[in-house]
Image (spheres, helix red, strand yellow):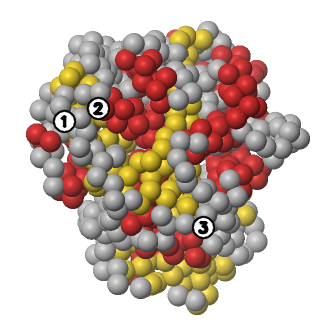
Amino acid sequence: MVKHTVKLTPNYLEVNGKRVAEAVAGESFLTKLYRLYNMEYPKFFKMDVLCKVGFVASEVLLGTEGGERFVPRSDRAVLLFNRHSSLHADNTFQRTIANPDEFYPSPSVFVYTLPNIVTGEIAIRNKYQGESSFILLPEKSEEAMDQAVARAFMDRETTSVLTGWVEAVSETEYEALLDLRLKT
Amino acid sequence: MELTEELKTKMIEALNLEEMTPADIDDNAPLFGDEGLGLDSIDVLELIVLLERNYGIKIADPKQGKEIFASVRTMADYVAANRTK
Amino acid sequence: MIIRKIAENIVSPLGFTTEENFASVMAGHTALRRYDSLWDLPFPCFVSLIPDERLDAEFETQVPCSTSTVYTKFEKCVLLSATKALKQCELDAASDRVVFILSSTKGNVTLLSDENPDIERVTPAHTAQLVARHFHNPNTPITVSNACISGLCAQIEAYRCLMSGQYDAAVVIGADVLSPFIVAGFQSLKALSDEQCRPFSANRKGLNLGEAAATVVYSVDDDAADGWRMLAGAVRNDANHISGPSRTGEGSYQALTAVIRDSGLSTNDLACLNVHGTSTMYNDEMESIAINRAALNAVPVNAMKGYYGHTLGAAGILETLLTMRALEDGIVPGTRGFDELGVSMPVKVSSQSVDTDKHTFVKLLSGFGGCNAAAAFTNPNLK
């Protein structure tokens, strides 16, 4: 059962199908939303764009859910999907090693060169100690994602799943379609 | 520019301390831990890269990092003493 | 419902079949060695690489495919391993009752260093599709990319796929190949040792990297009285830090506990705990804490990374297959590289092989992103 949904693109934010914010030219939409929703999490600024997108979308989603937050729990899984993995961070890291005369591999960029880090950031922020995973699909497929979520509920302890498509190939090309699903 | 000023500017950029300006960082304030800037182990590694890239200083063991990067002041002292660039 | 392993393969620096790999491990071999400037990297490293000549030769003779395509090393490893595994069973890989699952952390990331990188080919999802199409399989392949625990996650995913009734068999391939990207990355984290890694040892200095491809085929087989099967699997997040493990081993402990509970096992049932054992100061310490918290400190612990290095997306499958093979001979392989215990909580690690008459084990892994996975495997009627 789908409880809430969030859609985040470089142009707008929708919550449960209703448009709640729009991007304005010349400013970072993600930073604007970070401040608008009082997320108060300085680590946000260290994140790569995939993590920022996933973080902002999940913050809005979980704020919509309401209730007590930041209490450790093991019954909520975080399962996210995309096609391009951590491509943007990969490109950024590649640039730090591309020139043998300016060879300075960046540790803070390298840690983001895995797609599941975004599930880790969400888990850390929310103290979700349940299952976390990331699945890559050749293309966005509702059917494939629904089936994977159904499989996630096979873990006896899992009563809800924070799930959806989180893709960010560059700072200006990204999309998050997240929802919160409860076990039926 | 004074070395401490220079280090603060570079740190803010390297560590994505977006909401800070050099004026916000006290020379002697602890960089790590909850009372400080709240830097972590990845930040230490990134500061090690910063020192090599800008000042030609190589630090092989991240454990030395805790002393060198205790504050902007200790960092500046270390850089002044060891820089090759 | 009985789901069991019906076929397998390992393509690694220590051999291109499970048998070859097992013989090498039993002989105490490793292909881990020092390179002073591998790929012109400005630092020495200690890694284990799949030999290119042998890979190319076997790929050419064993994998029927288009000669006009130039396959990457990663693609060759994946295709070759899957091909060799499928030859061991009668499975019709083109059936819609079969699903392909790939486990990889970085796939074709080396392509990013090309002049004009083929962006679409970089993602492991592309390789998964390549493999599925190669075997004429009509289903959407699943690619698990959950850092270093991917290999166990992919097996858990396979089990769930089969238990759901949607499929009758799953071909699970775990693979990663090394590159300047990966080696420089781990070096920047100061996680690497430039010598043989020493799991759980007092003088451990870090991990060694390695590459491999390993395939396991699981099938529904209600008549099977024997064969390796997964009893339970669990994935849990530390919710602590994106690259450092929890100091209390929270996620590992929770995954271990869930698996012991769900499989109904007791300490006495276990031949061994095959752990992550990367030889970093933090990982091995954390695992020793998790093992003790889960009251499993009396169970023999062994780690494979002293033979192969850390094979990333392949590790969960490679290390599981070798443990299975070893237990078929009543052996818990020694932890190569171990010398003197150097973790704060007691764990039973030995550099020498130990005999066992038990046929159940638990595999444990941890990965960046704070994730941890555990799975219990058993083979009834093993003699």
Classify residue C255 as left or right of residue C165.
left
- What's the residue at 39%, 66% (across, down)? C163
Give the labeled residue for mark 2: C327
Please tell me in which quadrant of the rendered image residue C362 appears.
top left
Q: Is residue C78 above or below residue A98?
A: below
Ranked by sequence position, the earlier of labels 2 and 1 is 2
Chain of the residue under the numbered disc 2 shown in the image:
C
Residue most toward the bottom? A18
Closer to the camera in the image, C270 or A110: C270
Check if mark 2's residue and mark 1's residue have beta carbons within 8 Å.
yes
**Do tags 2 and 1 sit on the same chain?**
yes
Give the labeled residue for mark 3: C96
Chain of the residue under the numbered disc 1 shown in the image:
C
**Do tags 2 and 3 sit on the same chain?**
yes
Per the model, the C-alpha gap separating discs 3 and 1 is 37 Å
Q: Secondary structure at mark 3?
A: loop
Residue B35 appears at what percent x and percent y? 32, 44
Residue A49 visible at all:
no
Ranked by sequence position, the earlier of labels 2 and 3 is 3
Please tell me in which quadrant of the rendered image residue C203 appears.
top left
- What's the residue at 41%, 60% (across, down)? C220
Label of residue C358 in the image: 1
Please tell me in which quadrant of the rendered image residue A128 appears.
bottom left
Per the model, the C-alpha gap separating discs 2 and 3 is 33 Å
Residue C25 appears at what percent x and percent y? 41, 19
Residue C77 visible at all:
yes
Label 1 CA crowd tier, 10 Å (few <14, some 14–19, many 20+): many
Closer to the camera in the image, C13 or A128: C13
- What's the residue at 33%, 54% (across, down)? C224
